[in-house]
Image: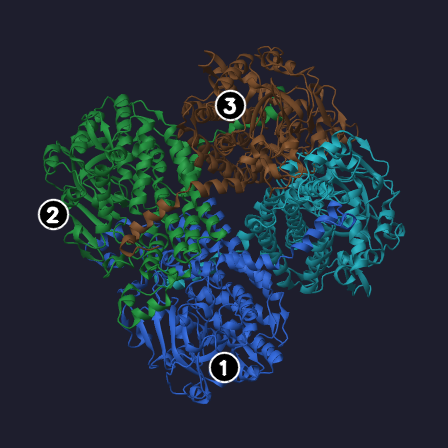
Chain colours: A cyan, B blue, C green, D brown
Amino acid sequence: MEHIPDRIDTGVQRREESAAERWARFAPITTGDEYVASLRNRGVTVYLFGELVAEPVDHPIIRPSINALKRTYDLAVEDPDLATAHSLLIDAPVNRFLHIVGSPHDLVMKNRMQRRMGQLTGTCFQRCAGLDTISVLHSITYDIDQAHGTSYHQRYLDFMKEAQRNNIILGAGMTDPKGDRSKRPSEQADPDLFLHVSRRTEKGIYVRGAKAHMTGGLNSHWIAVMPTMNMGEKDRDYAVVGLVPGDAEGITYIYGRQSCDTRAMEAGDIDKGNAQYGGQEVLVVFDDVFIPHAHVLMDGEYGFAQEMVARFTAYHRASYVCKTGLGDVMVGAAAAIADYNGADAASHVKDKLVEMTHLNETIFSSAIASSHEARQLPSGIFMNDAMLANVCKHNVTRFPYEISRLAQDLAGGLMVTLPSEQDFDHDVAGPILKKYFQGRANVPIEFRQRMLRLVENMTLGRNAVGYLTESLHGAGSPQAQRIQILRGMEVERKKGYARDLAGIRQQEHGAA
Amino acid sequence: MEHIPDRIDTGVQRREESAAERWARFAPITTGDEYVASLRNRGVTVYLFGELVAEPVDHPIIRPSINALKRTYDLAVEDPDLATAHSLLIDAPVNRFLHIVGSPHDLVMKNRMQRRMGQLTGTCFQRCAGLDTISVLHSITYDIDQAHGTSYHQRYLDFMKEAQRNNIILGAGMTDPKGDRSKRPSEQADPDLFLHVSRRTEKGIYVRGAKAHMTGGLNSHWIAVMPTMNMGEKDRDYAVVGLVPGDAEGITYIYGRQSCDTRAMEAGDIDKGNAQYGGQEVLVVFDDVFIPHAHVLMDGEYGFAQEMVARFTAYHRASYVCKTGLGDVMVGAAAAIADYNGADAASHVKDKLVEMTHLNETIFSSAIASSHEARQLPSGIFMNDAMLANVCKHNVTRFPYEISRLAQDLAGGLMVTLPSEQDFDHDVAGPILKKYFQGRANVPIEFRQRMLRLVENMTLGRNAVGYLTESLHGAGSPQAQRIQILRGMEVERKKGYARDLAGIRQQEHGAA
Amino acid sequence: MEHIPDRIDTGVQRREESAAERWARFAPITTGDEYVASLRNRGVTVYLFGELVAEPVDHPIIRPSINALKRTYDLAVEDPDLATAHSLLIDAPVNRFLHIVGSPHDLVMKNRMQRRMGQLTGTCFQRCAGLDTISVLHSITYDIDQAHGTSYHQRYLDFMKEAQRNNIILGAGMTDPKGDRSKRPSEQADPDLFLHVSRRTEKGIYVRGAKAHMTGGLNSHWIAVMPTMNMGEKDRDYAVVGLVPGDAEGITYIYGRQSCDTRAMEAGDIDKGNAQYGGQEVLVVFDDVFIPHAHVLMDGEYGFAQEMVARFTAYHRASYVCKTGLGDVMVGAAAAIADYNGADAASHVKDKLVEMTHLNETIFSSAIASSHEARQLPSGIFMNDAMLANVCKHNVTRFPYEISRLAQDLAGGLMVTLPSEQDFDHDVAGPILKKYFQGRANVPIEFRQRMLRLVENMTLGRNAVGYLTESLHGAGSPQAQRIQILRGMEVERKKGYARDLAGIRQQEHGAA
Amino acid sequence: MEHIPDRIDTGVQRREESAAERWARFAPITTGDEYVASLRNRGVTVYLFGELVAEPVDHPIIRPSINALKRTYDLAVEDPDLATAHSLLIDAPVNRFLHIVGSPHDLVMKNRMQRRMGQLTGTCFQRCAGLDTISVLHSITYDIDQAHGTSYHQRYLDFMKEAQRNNIILGAGMTDPKGDRSKRPSEQADPDLFLHVSRRTEKGIYVRGAKAHMTGGLNSHWIAVMPTMNMGEKDRDYAVVGLVPGDAEGITYIYGRQSCDTRAMEAGDIDKGNAQYGGQEVLVVFDDVFIPHAHVLMDGEYGFAQEMVARFTAYHRASYVCKTGLGDVMVGAAAAIADYNGADAASHVKDKLVEMTHLNETIFSSAIASSHEARQLPSGIFMNDAMLANVCKHNVTRFPYEISRLAQDLAGGLMVTLPSEQDFDHDVAGPILKKYFQGRANVPIEFRQRMLRLVENMTLGRNAVGYLTESLHGAGSPQAQRIQILRGMEVERKKGYARDLAGIRQQEHGAA
């Protein structure tokens, strides 16, 4: 590997745990409470507001993001038809977030579960990128093995058995920092701007680099690191897929800020808007982290990087159907405020609720259509239709913004002028506020406060990150979808339809 | 029936043919040519431009609309997987336009065939309302029988066997003229403004009234007359469903005009834009037309009128997926003109083609999602999801207009300033035009003419009726979809999600 | 001029009339009738449908376009405050379409007159490009004279005195056919694809080439030929501005088709929609046409071509305010049909009328703002703000399409299924149609017919060319405005605002 | 006043200061620093986060809102042409925010100054409602005097002389809490839900009630209380206009929360996004506040309440042109980030900047058009065009949301995942972040941080309140504009245009 010799073997030495040693730290999880317990005392290094976090589980800003993932466990208990599936791999029911999609129906059920989770949490519940990674790795390890005679697929299956038995959360570490975007991984001034193999030993490999804005990274038990884009021969060391426990030696987390994040640290629960649930984005730094061979699923097969990313985006862009669950909350919140204001019978109010619903269901239809129209891959699993997944995601980059605008319209200006919960509780100020903010008779003022704060939370506050900006950029920014649509639009075939109807017989002219 | 005594028994006497006599006039049709032949010499009364049409098949304005239906026969021959299905009723393959939908897959295949037909004809091929009527009548006759002990369903099955064996075209006569829209059928000053039973004899019933803007009415072998809206007890005589051959005594057709319709009568085929295919809308007048009992599928069961209409709109609003076939033609035509103009590499051109495709596929996804998400009705057949069908149709009332605008953008202004084909053929004017309208080298000027005329045809001309205005109003105007979305949006459930997240515990307050 | 020697002097010899001889054929026009009379017996060569037109004034397809221009004369008589202005040049009132804009107020009054003309004719009245040319030539001849010591400006003033005294119509011949768009004028395979000087004699010059889709070209008394884009030194012969009477030797007109154009040749006036008024686009071919020196306003000063075009687009893009007059007609027509259908009280109907009005007034505001914000040019006249003019035109490429869609929504499907006027007049069919198309009591069916046909005319038919496609492409296609907006958006200044607020002090870093 | 006897004379006794006594507390202000000083030590009662604020000027959350107003003083010093005008009242230059609009030009200059202030502060600078109130009161006091023989206009002029001489800030107290919206002021269960006269003494009146979401209320020297809607005879005591110093006895302020408000209390200035400027919304409670007769400008003349509100909305809806200044910042910030990311040459990036600019300038054109088209009122001042002002504001309820979405698109996902400023400063985490978030060479990472935080601030954070939600609801929610557009759209006139063109001669039928 003479092309990047100085990057290899940084000489760092970590404890070279085997796969078995790593799994030995886990025990099967069933309930949400067990999940929360499983995150305690992991000894991970986490920075937030310039300080090391002693125990992330107890940090008021981090906890809501954990609660969102916790809900994925509880839902499986409450509604197993929706949120579990029978795994052929271990011949037992598993959480659907760990299920290998064996049919279009599995993909459709995935979408239904995602919408439901959106309704229940009103935020990003952070488990979809990992779920979609599971599907991608099933098929891509199979294809690599076919081409290169490797045995990644069996490693994958072995890992997945443990993952399903222990009901762990797998996070997807995909987005490298990228540095200068006009340069390839191997051309960057700092080789670490894309994650790469930094050392190879008898027992495994070491990886070095970082994964940026990793959704729910800190709340995951395991992280799959994967290439973020197509790779060339010189990028061979960057074409690496590995599975790493979140508490592995050498990993550092730096927590991303969100709008209104510190409200979680205030007293009271009204002004938080959605006190229980939130999303999470972290920078995960890999400072020469060891991965045993059993957990390496690609190492140098750069020719498969692009296809891996393409499959990931196909799966993951349809996963944005979760936003229709948040859209349902927006419709409900806007309708409730209209009730509280006594405006629910106005025709323009009903018309705006219809428009919000229409947009929301349009998103839903693209996602679910993509899943129904899935096709089988060589490894035997199914992948949803890529064109429709891109169409779904592209609508997600637009419609939640309009739904959000309409919700703010129905909420009224009070949403951004309402005094704090503390003022409502104050001996002097409180009674004044209650006197003057009384709306429709019989509707407690607290209801108005809470519902207004919820809309604020989802359109300006912490969960606006998940409902709006993440809808724009997650799984690829708008232009990324347009490029895929351009590639898949089959314009030559369509020109043929037009020529036939226009009566153009090209062959007679040998032209155009 | 004392409430409308004077409407009963107009005393008109027609030849009271039996069902068998009526079917005796038909023979099985296989090819498109046979279909065209089957329409000849029917002796129907048709007015167009103030004149009786001697033979509609030979009229240059009418013929393109027949050609579009002809294509449905030829497609079944060319691509039987797509355009035929196995009928359990006669245990034989049948044209999919006559197939009773037995599964979600049948509905999905219907959508695929509709898109394909749109690609092939670039217009409304007029056979979908009849197709959707077949599904509606299967289930509604079953339900009426269950409620009233009637035997409509068996009559329906008997009719369908003949229909399938003979491969006939069934048209849907649904929209009554309606007169004063603030009044119910039985309250109209002129009782005929809604079609109704005007006489009852031993052998059958007579119907009187008219069906307005009936798509492909003149090109249909049989017409199903059906109520157009909910009915009350006093509208009992208006709650009638019957099957009538298009050449029955007492039927008169008056042909609807379309933009640029008379170009079909000009010499040459370039300026027509799409010389071969067109749509058709007619007023069909029923002047005491006889229907034997065997062909009566509802007579007075007014309580089922609303549900019948609801099912029809659910089926039919998803059938507007056909417009994505026309959208494919628009994308192809716009791309081809950009090629001819040498502008195909411009980034804004590609971006507009992507936008057109994105909108088109959004429509497609709503339709196909609606079909995949179908549910079974008591009669055993499947009905597609009503919410998603409304969402599909509602997008159809918007996106084709934007696609059309973008196509005109890429076409350039020449589309509306190009001289006539005759000028291009003129000894003096022709060479001048060819000199000055030469674009990219090697592209014959005729190609530009033809492609520009095709875009004109679909955005301003004859097939703009089908691509734009019919997309707006067919199967219900935009407001009709909004009403259905309002009804189906389950806002109370969604308010519950919002309350849960906002931390509102209603029971503690007994409020709001 | 060795670079294009073979193009010079085609050897063709025309009668070399002096300016005075040419003006001698004119007499002052006051009324619309006098205008129509002035067009008779000019002996122009016009092709339409492959035939020479004997007398354009009497051709039923051409006449409505003449009527629209006729209205500009009558309006000046009826409402002189609006449609005339005092000319300092001849110290007398002149038609505002011939007025040299001496102030922002003149530009505002121009916009008001344009909107009014749109309301009165419902079509393109074809006199704006000439009007804006008058302003452009005033300033550009002045600037050329300053730079080159020429005397074009005095020639211009002399011409304008005659033009104002005789109240003639000046047409703008700007758009060359352009051929291969990747090549400059002097590089085209056929030198005639851009109009150019083909011969120079003692008395004047000859020009050769063509001007494509020239609005109202045949209805103009004089034509100003001008460059259509920036020119380089090698394009010197193409940098020519000249004034030519429409009946000059060597000019040929070939008439452009429009949607539904032949309805003008049908009997009756209902189905025409707007029987009286229409637009006109013609190809005007200059086969070595002579121009005396007195009527040459640029000859070789290629450096001014780009600025001339820039000024023309600034003036002309705001002239698209005329479409708000057509928008007023659309609002009125949609409201009237809603009345006729008895739907005028529905909230969604009112809401759609509001949306149509909102969009229409948004266009209006950009135009009128552009005029109010005019700045003085060196020649003393005023030019409206270029950025706002581009914004106006860019909205015109979008909003009329949406207004049109909403009008079709309110019109209902009958707009495209209504039988012909001839059927309504037929002995048998007529009474049937009148029976079944009766709507709201007391509203004659003919009213519905007429109003529906008007909406058809403006959204699909002949005047949809003016209301829609011309709105898209006239004065530059959408991308042309985006390029101008990009150029004028002063992004560096705006980055400075952002840096100041973000607290970025660039100088401290010497960066970015 | 027997209709609400129990509301009169609450018996509360305040110090009954004369107008002169009140003005005696003021001294002329010139610079921004003097303005800030003038706010100190006023002894006002302010609640924020459940606590009394000792000195609002020093509170880190409040101070940025004061800075925004401070900028209005400094701008007058820096750019007197823009931000001052010559007052005829005191024959001296005055801050334009206190100028009585004497011409359309004054209104245009107002708009220019508003845009400039938006560029300089990136937030709501809170002085426009007061400015527009000045215009409204000039004309309405004049009109009341004409009708009722009162002398309010002279009182107004006297007040304005002092206001101009002292260069004070006048805030507009308009929006009452309104309680049950289906009831009129005099019908509310709690009479205080609309501000009203609670006592009358020899020296003046007492008012009682509250004004909700008052922009910049706490930062104003004087507050004008005014009716918020039309009033009937029974609401006579609610038809009151008075001028009150912000530190009058009986006034309490309760501060409204904003998204991310507490970031202002964090260390560092990066994460604040716009550390210097912010908006302010407060609830202002009037607990029997005394107003001397000299400062009462309406008392019981209920018939003028509606017209007063109508004029206020006409003026104020065009004042939303300020958002184009914020739009300029958005364009600049998005362009700067694209630079920092090395994406500035991408065609889709440029296209999005063009779209943002196009939308922004569309807003600008409606505002400025409205001002240019102003008409004179009886009192001699000018009022901008109401239709165009409504059109302006209605576009403001839409376009900033789309501009914001596009800015987030160009900003990239990092905007919502970036760790805190404290992490960047941390010994261990800081270097890691700087290593991995390095983008384009030579661009300091701090630049990216600051620019991303600015976009966050304006689209999700504190100034998103001003740029988005206030754009939606300020000066009336979207539906309020639609109602005004409906009222002003002159649909009957437009129907006439349509009838004329359609050839409908109504008089011949006496119909429709």
Question: Does residue B358 sit above or below B245 in this rendering?
Answer: above
- The answer for how far apart the CA atoms under marks 1 and 2 are is 69 Å
- In the rendered image, residue B198, in percent from the top left (x then y), is placed at 43, 79
Q: Nearer the viewer, residue C512 or D20?
A: D20
Q: Nearer the viewer, residue A299 or A375?
A: A375
Q: Nearer the viewer, residue C176 or B289?
A: B289
- In the rendered image, residue B79, in percent from the top left (x then y), is placed at 50, 73
- The answer for how far apart the CA atoms under marks 2 and 3 are is 65 Å
Instruction: Report the side of B378 relative to B157 (left or right).
Output: right
| Same-chain check, marks 1 and 3 | no
Question: Does residue A280 sit above or below D139 in this rendering?
Answer: below
Q: Is residue B326 visible?
A: no
Mark 2 vs mark 3: in front: 3
Residue C41, disc: 2
Q: Quadrant of the C terminus of chain C?
A: top right
Question: Does residue D102 sit above or below C464 in this rendering?
Answer: above
| Residue, disc 3 | D134
Question: Which chain does the numbered disc 3 sit on?
Answer: D
| Same-chain check, marks 1 and 2 | no
Query: In the figure, residue D429 lies in which quadrant?
Result: top right
- Which residue appears at 73% of the width and 54% of the height? A131
Instruction: Give, as a three-letter code, the residue at label 3.
Output: Ile
Instruction: Give, as a three-letter code, the residue at label 1.
Output: Val
Mark 1 vs mark 2: in front: 1
Instruction: Report the side of D151 relative to D334 (left or right).
Output: left
Mark 1 vs mark 3: in front: 3
| Residue, disc 1 | B296
Asked if disc 1 and disc 3 are in contact, CB closer than 8 Å, the reply is no
